[in-house]
Image (cartoon, helix red, strand yellow):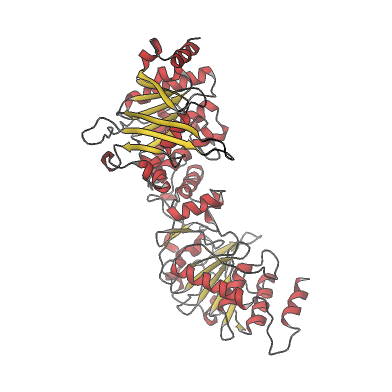
Amino acid sequence: MITTTLDQLIEDRPEDSAPVVLDEQAKREVRRACLSGVCVPGYIVPFGSREMPVARGWGSGGLQVTLAIGGPDDSVKVIDQGDEEGVNAVNLRRLIAGTLRCRTTADTLDASIVQSRHRVPEDKLDADDILVLQVPQSEPLRKVEKSVYECKRRHAEADYAKMWVGLYEGLAQNGVISGGAGYPVMVQDRYLMAPSPIPRWDIPRLDDSDHLTLLSHGRDKKIYAVPPHTKVEPLTFTDVPFEVEYTAGSRCGLCGSDDTFLVETAAGDYLCSDVQWCLKVRAGMADQDHRDRSPLHLLPDPSRRVLATAGTKRRSWTAPPAGVTAPGEEWSIKVSDLGKTYRGYRGSSEVVAAAAVSFDVAPGEALGIIGESGSGKSTVMRCLIGDELEATGAVFLGSVDEGRTNVLDLDPAERRALRIGTLSVVYQDPAAGLDLGISAGGNVADRLTAAGWRSYHAIRDRAAELLERVEVPLERMDDVVGQFSGGMRQRVQIAKALATDPQVLLLDEPTTGLDASVAAGVLDLLRELLAEREIAVVVVSHDFSVIDALTDRALVMRHGRVVETGLTDQLFADPHHPYTQRLVAAAKH
């Protein structure tokens, strides 16, 4: 069926007529996207085009680029799985030749455009060549982030920490970074790209290359590019080197090469992936400089690999740094006249969730905010975290611009950055603060990599230290958090929150939903940790017993306003406001 369609497109036409597979408007759209990709290396550029008349899996993205940039004077080479004679390669070559009326070739050195799916050819490409890669997945973050909006945000903010978490998980489980095709790379130290599905062996050949590389995903209609002499660097840790695929002692069974990318056959021997290169070697026509270009310096070295159990030995607790206050002040966090009003629904009146809330907290001090559901305490917490925007008033942090900048005026990206090292949150539901699909150590690594840590062993040791401190057994450090109990998850979340030694810690109903005995254990742990640290703590809870156990001072909220403040033990022993009296009475019963 497919062959018949190609025959109709290509052969059943006059000699001076070419099939209209891609109209001129679509070609212009593709060329514009290619130019944008060249101007911003690694950036994913959308383009407009109709679907191509080829089956799924044939590489319609690469086909659209080749047809848009090629012409009668070009010589085109099409390879699939390293071979020019596969079904896909043959039919795509026929379609391209019939459409562009150009020459086709099997020799890389004779080609001006090389369209490939799985390989960068072994022959050296020069400045006159264009490599077009067919990409099956245009979004490299899709493996770690399902939200399209979040993927776009992470690219905009260069927030790629989760990719390092994936590398951490592989090392922790296997002792080696074992990702295969589509290994993530950074382009010009700015944009994350996955040159899928070429193997790791070919990644070094994209760095500072003489040729232009265009990568295209036809179904998603996305293009990105690597211009000549562009920095392309694989993601890895500073203390764990990047390695290419290789089996010790392997050689091509036909040409004897040991400096090419080899594929294993069903019989257990090896053959060159690039079939034409293998033929050249056997004919004595291969480039003699090829070995110098091969990534032999990146072959696996068992002596450089990490032990999967590294970092799980018992370690002494490291004293956290001293708290930071604004110059001449005693507080680490100060809140002044904080307010939040929600618009009415369909003409109803506005809802004042918080109004004129003010307090400050010093290092080593814990402040409690208590109230029933709807009192406004959770709204105050969300405003401090940055989950609620358009709040009024002011919030100052002693470690941010010496306490002079109102953090409510910062843009969302800057607010999120504060939650990495300056301000941490422990949520009521551990699922809100953890990735339940990765290990306990990986969750701590998530915070550390976001803070810029790039040493695997340092991250591993820090995670082990923190998890041990919150009484998570180290033999479960590499277990997936989704397998943990609620109390154990909360302990992992506490370890993650403390990973970067924040100056302010926010606890949002930290024991709600836990069994009484488990909650008591978490409260005991929090008391110990807070006693050890010069950290300002804000605890939000509807449970007066939690506030009494953890805090020095407290304020009581009702209908969005503070109705009473004071020392926690005094409020508990001698409440003045009728509403506080009811809360205390409920807690005592």
Q: Quadrant of residue 451?
A: top left
Marks counted in the figure total 0
Residue in view at x 51 percent, y 67 percent: 260
Q: Nearer the viewer, residue 189 or 587?
A: 587
Q: Nearer the viewer, residue 399 or 10?
A: 399
Q: Nearer the viewer, residue 441 or 525?
A: 525
Q: Nearer the viewer, residue 275 or 444?
A: 444
Residue in view at x 37 percent, y 37 percent: 393
Q: Which residue in the rendered view is the most extreme toward the left? A: 328
Q: Residue 523, relative to residue 1: is it above or below?
A: above
Residue in view at x 50 percent, y 22 percent: 372
Q: Position of residue 469 (x, y in %)?
A: 40, 28
Looking at the image, can residue 479 be seen? Answer: no
Residue in view at x 69 percent, y 64 percent: 56
Looking at the image, can residue 553 be seen? Answer: yes
- Give the left or right position of residue 540, taking residue 346 as reference: left
Q: Position of residue 336 (x, y in %)?
A: 34, 33
Q: Quadrant of residue 100?
A: bottom right
Q: Position of residue 548 (x, y in %)?
A: 41, 17
Which image quarter holds the N terminus? Answer: bottom right
Q: Position of residue 503 (x, y in %)?
A: 33, 34
Q: Residue 292, relative to residue 362: is it above or below?
A: below
